[in-house]
Amino acid sequence: MRRLESLMGVHIELRNGTILVEGAEAETVDLANAIINRLYRLVLNKEHVDPSVVSYAVSLAKRGELDRIDSLYTEVVATTFRGRPIRCKTLGQLEYIEKIRNHVLTFAIGPAGTGKTYLAVAMAVSALKAKQVERIILTRPAVEAGEKLGFLPGDLSQKVDPYLRPLYDAMYDMLGGDTTQRLQERGVIEVAPLAYMRGRTLSDAFIILDEAQNTTREQMKMFLTRLGFRSKIIVTGDPSQKDLAIGKMSGLDEAVRILGDVPEIAIQRLTSHDVVRHELVQKIVEAYDAYAAHREENNGRKSGFAAEPAEKAEP
């Protein structure tokens, strides 16, 4: 109730089993009542309603889409190894899952915290359990090491683990550490840097390329052409977090432009509305988006705002 008060600018009291909503504008009070009734129905269905759910319900209500919140609870995407059901938390995520199901190749583009990788791994595990594929392949470019990992200590696994850790974390959540390791030993699950995909044909597999904004155009073409029969590919990335050298074309940006009209390929764009981490993450994403838009607008003007001063060199 406190979260709803803050977001809607109303006063809410619980009095003798009745929720009373007061506010300066009747329209706002009616909207707050509608949100409460909708969330109460979720509680009656034994769904978990936390402050993040309240925030998203308010966001939907203000966009006139409150009725669609029920669709987020109609289906379980997967179940963790501890038995916790995994559901979509936003409409954008729900569209993402549908596109994965209906397309051979899906690009998921969006900021941190929108569930791009986690939901992709959930879908991969579901496909493996349903015997729709024979193996799961998880990969990402090790940009920080330039794909040349020889100077790091240890064997191949130890060298690339720091770059693949987010994929391991998601897989451990779905299957547990012991099961994941057993499946890796049998070759059912493979986690490897992007450089090790070259020259292969990946059939009967669910393949996820993570952090694709850090691929070069050559790497992206190489990866996409690994697709074999009865396989599915998901490519995830955040164009705002590139680690490529300045002036280097991102393979993700180029692929989305080139392949956007191919019917078998889907592109899902997630936004700050789909961030499901701490609510501060959403505000951070929105602030950076606004700043980027402001800079782009200024750079495109011949007059108006003064250009930003050049950064001083470090002493």
Image: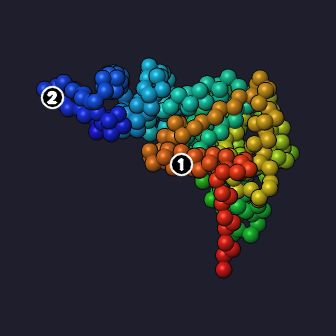
Q: Image quarter for residue 225?
A: top right
Residue 20 in the image: x percent, y percent? 21, 26
Mark 2 and mark 1 in contact? Answer it, CB < 8 Å.
Answer: no
On the image, numbered disc 1 is attached to which residue?
287
Residue placed furthest toward the bottom: 315
Q: How many circles with numbers are drawn on the protein?
A: 2
Q: Where does the image place residue 40, in percent across and percent down from the top left?
A: 31, 24
Coordinates of residue 39 in the picture (x, y in percent):
35, 26
The residue nearer to you, when weighing 59 against 121, is 59
Q: Is residue 138 visible?
A: no
The quarter of the rendered structure image containing the N terminus is top left
Screen quadrant of the C terminus: bottom right
Q: Residues within 10 Å of mark 2 (few under 14, many from 20)?
A: few
- The residue under label 2 is 15
Residue 259 x, y percent position in the rendering: 80, 32
Amino acid bearing label 2: Arg
Residue at image point 78% right, 36% down? 257
Cα distance, mark 2 to mark 1?
Answer: 39 Å
266, above or below 244, in the image: above
Query: Which label number is shown at residue 179?
Result: none
Residue type, mark 1 in image? Ala
Q: Which residue is painted at 24% across and 32% down in the image?
A: 12
The residue carrying pointer 1 sits among few (fewer than 14), some (14 to 19) or many (20 or more) residues within 10 Å by Cα, namely few
Determine whether the residue tagged by mark 1 lies in a helix, strand or loop: helix
The mark closer to the camera, 2 or 1, is 1
Relative side of 250 to 62, left or right: right
Q: Is residue 26 visible?
A: yes
Is 211 on the left-hand or right-hand side of 3? right
Depth check, front residue: 187 or 289: 289
- 176 relative to 42 in the view: left or right: right
Residue at the image point whose x is 56% and y is 30% from the top: 92
Q: Give the residue displayed 50% in from the left and 31% down from the top.
A: 90
